[in-house]
Image (tube, rainbow, N blue to C red):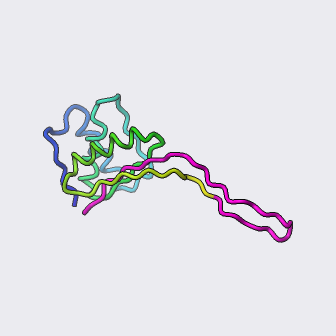
Amino acid sequence: MFKLVAPYEPAGDQPQAIAKLTDGIISGAKHQTLLGVTGSGKTFTVANVIRNVDKADARHFAQQTLAAQLYAEFKSFFPHNAVEYFVSYFDYYQPEAYIPRTDTFIEKIPAATRRSSACACPR
């Protein structure tokens, strides 16, 4: 169970956004978009949705700095739950292979690309 801790309540458009996003997840929507300018409370809105649906959430970011910032914010919103931060340097991996018919050897190809993840997980 997720216990959201925050010194403030949803305000402005947040209650409506929280309700729509929550309903979308419960009804099985595959894709939803939350728009907002920097500092508008998008992370707090998502934290409320996580609490409402009571399901773990994983976020993937190409930018490590953004992942670290969101990790810190989620950690503060869910101090009683596990919030994880992971940096992977490989987002693509082709194992080595041999094709006998054409006598072709394909070398393994790891593509080193920084990919960061922040995850709010129940514990």
- The region drawn magenta spans 94-123
Residue at 15%, 39% (x, y): give it. 9
Quadrant showing the C terminus: bottom left
Residue at 54%, 52% (x, y): give it. 90
Residue 48 at what x, y percent from top left? 24, 47
Q: Quadrant of residue 72?
A: top left
Residue 81 vs residue 118: left or right?
left
Farthest-out residue, bottom: 100
Q: Quadrant of residue 26?
A: bottom left
Residue 3 at what x, y percent from top left? 18, 54
Residue 65 vs residue 121: left or right?
right
**Front-most of residues 96 and 49:** 96
**Front-most of residues 74 and 36:** 74
Quadrant showing the N terminus: bottom left
Residue at 79%, 68% (x, y): give it. 99
**Number of marks in picture:** 0
Residue 67 at what x, y percent from top left? 38, 43
**Front-most of residues 93 and 21:** 93
In the rendered structure, does residue 96 fall within the stretch colored magenta?
yes
Q: Quadrant of residue 41?
A: top left
Residue 46 at what x, y percent from top left? 30, 45
Q: What kind of secondary structure does the magenta stretch mostly adopt?
A: strand
Residue 32 vs residue 22: left or right?
right
In the rendered structure, does residue 55 fall within the stretch colored magenta?
no
Farthest-out residue, right: 102
Residue at 40%, 49% (x, y): give it. 59
